[in-house]
Image (cartoon, rainbow, N blue to C red):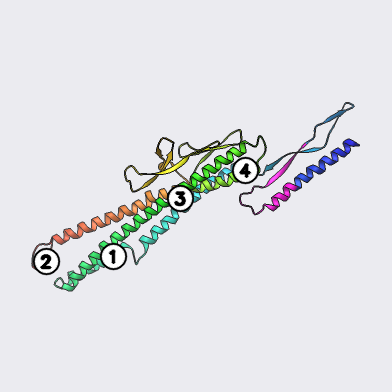
Amino acid sequence: MSLFINNGLSGLLASQRALQTIANNVANVNTEGYVRQQTSFVAGPVQFQGGFGIGTGVRVNDIERVYDQFLGNEVKLATMAQSRAQSYNAMAMRLDGLLGNPDLNISTSIQKFFDQLEAVNRDPTSLVNREQLLAEGGALEARFRQIDSQLAGLGNEIDNRLQNSVNSVNDIAAALAEINNRIASTAGGTPNDLLDQRERLFTRLGEQIDFTQLRQDNGMTNIMVASGQPLVLGSQSFKLALTPNEFDASKLELAYDNGGGLQPISSRIAGGAIAGMLGFRNEALATAGRELGQIALGLAETVNMQNRAGADLNGQSGG
């Protein structure tokens, strides 16, 4: 009778623990980053009586997170790619607004300049037309300088955003190292809340930079960036920094602080907001600045060459 009662009691206690787990799931249905949990059971040890093995009921084996590691990794990869695209697109829209505005873009100023050239050509003796041409030329030069300054402003904004992202990455790395330490100290337990916190930090890290994970037997996870530089090793975290570009000191590059110096790693970053900002600066923004300079140079050389071929009101050759 005693064994019968104990078996029934073990079932009640196990079911109570399962209901507690379910209640916890319901309570956290709107908690960001919470992963649903489930209770797993195992049969109690068998007792032998009269040569027969008699069960001793049921025991709670573990309370596990319902988490698919493969899907979790796919979500992280998607987050890195999406964050890069969003960061790049946000800055590209700013550039498009600057260069594509019909009232402010350089093509409008160039057209006004050439319209006034045509007016001078129709009436070359008109001093009013000549003065207006000089004014349009000055306005065109000012517009070139203004756009160049705005492009430089976008570059400075990217540097500021990169610094904020680097600070965020360093803070996340320190937090991950701390959680690693707490997970390792649970001595074989299942720290579901810490695992949830770590997954949330992984998501935040993926929004800033792409990374790879190496899981350890003690529950810790090492984090690598770029071409294998460790960002988190067990309970120790490392830092990223910004350093001037070796060919253009006005540009900041992402670097890894190895303790003895800064190692540039910009070219090895492929995901996250940092990669999006670096990609925009090195592709769209650099192209826009280069083409603006080429337009200005080609226009100036062409106009000056044509001007030298003509003559002023006094019949003197153009200068």
Give me the C-alpha separation between circle 4 and circle 3.
26 Å
Q: Amino acid at mark 3?
A: Asn
The reply to whether callout 4 and callout 2 are in contact (CB within 8 Å) is: no
Q: Earlier in the sequence, mark 1 or mark 3?
A: 1
Q: Position of residue 247 (x, y in %)?
A: 31, 43
x, y percentage for residue 47?
84, 30
Marks 4 and 2, Cα distance to the nearest angstrom?
Answer: 82 Å
Task: From the viewer's perspective, tell me whether residue 30 is left or right of residue 214.
Answer: right
Q: Secondary structure at mark 3?
A: helix
Q: What residue would you read off at disc 2?
A: 312
Q: Which residue is mark 3?
A: 164
Mark 4: few/some/many CA within 10 Å (<14, 14-19, 20+): some
**Nearest to N terminus: mark 4 or mark 1:** 1
Under circle 4, the secondary element is helix
Q: Is residue 55 magenta?
A: no
Numbered circle sitting on residue 109: 1
Q: Position of residue 126 (x, y in %)?
A: 16, 73
Sequence order check: which comes first, mark 2 or mark 3? Answer: 3
Find the magenta span and give its range. 20-42
Which quarter of the figure has residue 191? top right
Type of residue at label 4? Leu
Q: Are marks 2 and 3 in contact (CB under 8 Å)?
A: no
Check disc 1 and report its element: helix, strand or loop.
helix
The residue located at (85%, 38%) in the rendering is 7
Which of the marked residues, 2 or 1, is nearer the chain's N terminus?
Answer: 1
The residue pinned by badge 4 equals: 194
Q: Is residue 54 visible?
A: yes
User: Callout 2: 10 Å neighbours few (<14), some, many (20+)?
Assistant: few
